[in-house]
Image: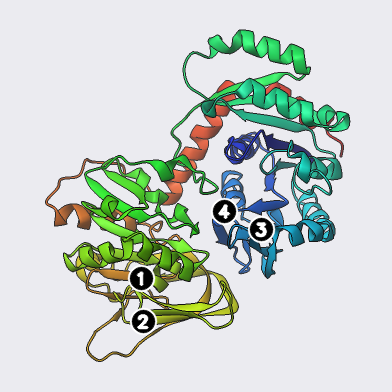
Amino acid sequence: MAKVIMVQGTMSNAGKSLIAAGLCRIFRQDGYRAAPFKSQNMALNSFATKEGLEMSRAQAVQAEAAGIEPLVCMNPVLLKPTDDQGSQVIVNGKSIGSMKARDYFRFKTELIPVIKEAFRKLEDSFDIIVIEGAGSPAEINLRENDIVNMGLAEMVDAPVILVGDIDRGGVFAQLLGTLMLLEDDEKERVKGLIINKFRGDASLLDSGIEMLEEKCGVPVVGTVPYADLKIEDEDSLSERLAADKRGLVDIAVVRLPKISNFTDFDVFGQYPDVSVRYVSEAEELRGADMIVIPGSKSTIADLEWMRGQGLADEIIRLSGEGVPVFGICGGYQMLGTKVSDPEGVEGGGEAGGLGLLPVSTVLSGVKKTEQFRGAFCDAEGIFSGLSGLGIEGYEIHAGRTCRDGDPGRSVSGFTSGDTGACCGNIYGTYIHGIFDSNGIAGTVVKALADRKGAALSACDELSRREFREMEYDRLADMLREHLDMDRIYSMLREAAF
């Protein structure tokens, strides 16, 4: 049976996911079969496995870092927020419906057998399981029947490393305060502390670290520097969503309130002359070379939000000036003439779309989650060079989009298998990860640069997979340099079988 180690954090976005991914990579490099595990994740960034099951992208990324195929048992429970009070609940890759927070709090203990069974599947196949917690274990109002932090650590008898984020300030208070709020048996599980995202001279922390260790009795096993790694972030707290720097080629992504799978655009980070900005106001769209409407968990609500912000009118205006507009999943649905929700999948209702593509969408309770292999078909306009290029990605959506049959407007198939449509410089598709396959992002960037007569800097034409592998190795090298891996391996040796 596998050895286990658990990474918990003092707060959301402390860096748990990245630390866990780095440990998975290190263990793989050291010859071990490692696998990630997160019993319950709350995120709108999701992934479809080969079996057509839905799981968090964070665990899919960690699996990739470990050099293994993502499996739904690595994330048996996924919560996808639908509004401020509730979430869609996905268990073992399939939706079981939506629940309000209070109802889920009462229900979640019924998921313990599901979580244990998923963990057992990994135990039987791997040497080391790297578990990630959620939020903070010090949320004392949520301690009862906990299934993701200390409750899970007790369930599987895991030693814990606690990560604090110094970039957001108060890291010593974060770490010490978290430990003070734990029960004695929970505190005993914490075998090491990590100070994450440090900028500057680490020796300046020495006196604080010494005092922290004296007060809490737990060693600091590393101070990890802030690093600009091009590895996917887990959720909408991602710092890259706040970036506003404009590159030679500027891509503006609408920052929808229920934005999903914003990692679709991470590939453009490989190009030094390209900026990806996430915008919430109409004036921020001006000067963009391409506008992207991403996926959404609440298509109609986010469409109405775009109208209220003036974004919808500005997108229509700029598209008339020839600025290409690209919609993915919910964004594709919004580009059409109408989105209706007769079954109340996302709360019900109907809304007119932007009318940039002659298609309409009807949402339904039948959710499509599957991987995709196909190609671009009859790409028109600025991205006509995409025609014939192969695509590997995945679909996760409720509903079906059909052409309106308006004889006055021509529309072409954009991606094979009736998964998209295009009309001039307006493009829509259901395929997540569409820019990741070889040659696609480069073709898009070059077309945008050519349109404005700009010359791009030379850059290495690595495939997306090669680039990601390089970044995982960079992450592992950084952690090896700044973590006491001997102590971390000793935690594994002391962990129960």
Name the residue type under label 1.
Gly
Q: Distance between the residues labelled 3 and 1?
A: 27 Å
Please give the residue where the numbered disc 3 appears in the rendered image: 78
Q: Of the residues under marks 4 and 1, which one precedes in the sequence?
A: 4
Q: Which of 345 and 424 is in front in this view?
A: 345
State the SS at label 2. Answer: strand
Query: Which of the two marks, 4 or 3, is nearer to us in this view?
Result: 3
For the C terminus, the quadrant is top right
Q: Which mark is residue 428?
A: 1
Please give the residue where the numbered disc 4 appears in the rendered image: 57
State the SS at label 4. Answer: helix
Q: Are marks 4 and 1 in contact (CB under 8 Å)?
A: no
State the SS at label 1. Answer: strand
Name the residue type under label 2.
Val
Q: Residues within 10 Å of mark 1 (few under 14, many from 20)?
A: many
- Decide: is 387 above or below 175: below
Q: Of the residues under marks 4 and 3, which one precedes in the sequence?
A: 4
Q: Residues within 10 Å of mark 2 (few under 14, many from 20)?
A: many
Q: How far apart are marks 4 and 3 (CA)?
A: 10 Å
Tell me if 172 is positioned left or right of 190 in this view: left
**Which residue is at the far left?**
453
Q: Of the residues under marks 2 and 1, which one precedes in the sequence?
A: 2
Please give the residue where the numbered disc 2 appears in the rendered image: 359
Q: Distance between the residues labelled 4 and 1?
A: 22 Å
Query: Residue at image x 44%, y 59%?
Result: 433
Tell me if 225 is positioned left or right of 382 in this view: right
